[in-house]
């Protein structure tokens, strides 16, 4: 992890982030989903510009190359991109609610180097600093091994059919 740098994403990063997410969604879900499910998953994944505007979205770089991105949220939406239905920008109450971990993507050329782990550390520290005591997320099948390795427990399995073919997801939680 030593040679990974992190910073908050800005709106200038958006085109590069969209390109990275596209590659991660297409390539890294192949061991877990069939082609129709990957196509369907686009409706429930991708960029959420609200996180960038909120200053809660991180970019990870290695030697100037974009290696990954991901963030957290103090808002109610649990998962999904700008195009997903059912979003809720209501602010969460740190004394009652779990902060959200959102939109984690690693560039396919930078997997298994601790990018995801670093983003989770950054998210958990930032959420803790705002008084949250729990974090929650909706994991893709590609994300489950990372979250398990980082102490998240499965709470519920769901199928999301908004994009067509049903996409399996697991709601997971961690106490900070
Ligand atoms: C999920 C994702 C972000 C993981 O990124 P990553 O940077 O490769 O993860 P890390 O290198 O930090 O992995 C940390 C640990 O998680 C586990 N892990 C991560 N990916 C794994 C995989 N594909 N298979 C098995 N274990 C895995 C391992 O324990 C790993 O530690 P190790 O490499 O020392 O064995 C990446 O695969 C991705 O972008 N997937 C497609 C998009 C997606 O579905 N995002 C999740 C949305 S909820």
Image (cartoon, rainbow, N blue to C red):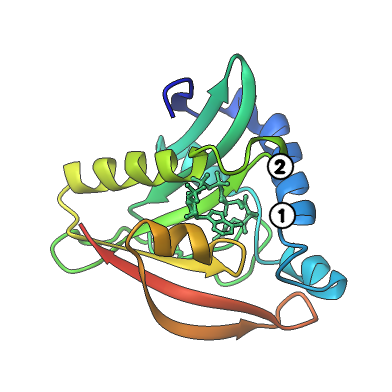
Question: Image height check: is 19 above or below 76?
Answer: above
Relative placement, left or right, of 37 versus 44 is: right
Identity of the residue drawn at 76% across and 74% down:
163
Q: Is mark 2 within 8 Å of ligand 1?
A: yes
Residue 150 at x, y percent in the picture: 36, 56
Q: Do the residues bearing badges 2 and 1 touch, measured as CB atoms within 8 Å?
A: yes
Which residue is depicted at the point 69% across and 45% down? 21
Q: Nearer the viewer, residue 112 or 135?
A: 112
Q: Residue 117: which quarter of the image?
A: top left
Report the side of 147 relative to 33 (left or right): left
Residue at the spot of label 1: 28
The residue beneath circle 2 is 108
The quadrant of the picture occupied by the N terminus is: top left
Q: Tell me if residue 87 can be seen.
A: no
Left or right: where does residue 129 sit relative to residue 49?
Answer: left
Which residue is farthest right? 35
Residue 104 in sight: yes
Q: Residues within 10 Å of mark 1 (few under 14, many from 20)?
A: some
Query: Which residue: 60% across, 69% down?
Result: 141
Q: Secondary structure at mark 2?
A: helix
Q: Is residue 171 above or below residue 13?
A: below
Q: Is residue 60 above or below residue 149?
A: above
How far across and how far down the image is residue 157, in percent? Answer: 50, 85
Q: Residue at x 19, y 47 (%)?
A: 128
């Amino acid at each position: 992890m030593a040679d990974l740098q992190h910073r908050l994403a800005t709106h200038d990063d958006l085109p590069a982030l969209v390109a990275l997410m596209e590659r991660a969604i297409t390539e890294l879900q192949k061991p877990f989903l069939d082609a129709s499910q990957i196509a369907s998953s686009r409706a429930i994944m991708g960029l959420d510009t609200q996180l960038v505007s909120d200053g809660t979205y991180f970019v990870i770089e290695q030697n100037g190359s974009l290696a990954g991105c991901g963030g957290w949220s103090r808002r109610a939406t649990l998962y999904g991109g700008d195009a997903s239905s059912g979003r809720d920008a209501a602010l969460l109450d740190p004394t009652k609610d779990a902060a959200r971990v959102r939109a984690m993507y690693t560039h396919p050329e930078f997997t298994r180097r601790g990018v995801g782990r670093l983003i989770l550390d950054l998210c958990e520290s930032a959420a803790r600093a705002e008084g949250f005591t729990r974090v929650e997320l909706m994991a893709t099948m590609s994300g489950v091994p990372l979250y398990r390795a980082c102490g998240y427990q499965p709470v519920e399995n769901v199928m999301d059919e908004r994009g067509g073919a049903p996409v399996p997801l697991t709601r997971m939680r961690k106490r900070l």
